[in-house]
Amino acid sequence: MSPAKPAFETIQFPERGDRLSPQGQMRNTAVAGSDHLLTPQQVADRLGVSERWVRDHATRRCPRIPAVRLGPLLRFRLSDIERFLAENSLSEASQNRRNVV
């Protein structure tokens, strides 16, 4: 008797290389860590706020946390959260003024 063949075989897809952007320039699509998607709860834990606060700031104009909609799901890029923190951090000079008042 011959050995049984599996019902399916694993398909090996080629590695995702650089792709052309709409402007025709090459860009790297596999940037480690920058496109990692987070749930609203993970963002809330990272920022020390409630999940409701995160969802509210994903829909308001200012300050707005950039979000990605995947059907009914809301996800956040780690790089966008880090940029949001950097843009909304108080500078040292403004912190000193707040302490004087």
Image (cartoon, helix red, strand yellow):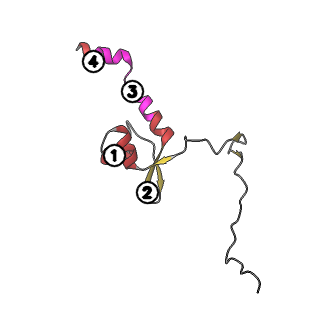
Please indicate, yes or no, whether residue 65 appears anywhere in the rendered image: yes
The N terminus lies in which quarter of the figure? Answer: bottom right
Residue 73, numbered label: 2
Query: Label 1: which residue?
Result: 56
Classify mark 2: helix, strand or loop. Answer: strand
Q: Amino acid at mark 1?
A: Asp
Q: Is residue 34 left or right of residue 38?
A: right
Classify mark 3: helix, strand or loop. Answer: loop
Query: Label 4: which residue?
Result: 98
Q: Is residue 95 above or below residue 35?
A: above
Residue 29, percent from left and from top: 64, 45
The image quadrant that residue 48 belongs to is: top left
Looking at the image, which residue sits at the far top?
Answer: 100
Measure the C-alpha gap from mark 4 to mark 3.
Answer: 14 Å
Looking at the image, which residue sits at the far bottom?
Answer: 1
Measure the C-alpha gap from mark 4 to mark 2.
Answer: 39 Å
Report the predominant secondary structure element of the magenta stretch: helix
Between 4 and 47, the residue placed more toward the observer is 4
Mark before the other along the chain sequence, 1 or 2: 1
Q: Nearer the viewer, mark 1 or mark 2?
A: 2
Label 4 close to label 1 by CB (< 8 Å) = no
Measure the C-alpha gap from mark 1 to mark 3.
Answer: 19 Å
Q: Nearer the viewer, mark 1 or mark 3?
A: 3
Residue 89, numbered label: 3
Region of the chain picked out in magenta, as a range: 84-97
Q: Amino acid at mark 4?
A: Arg
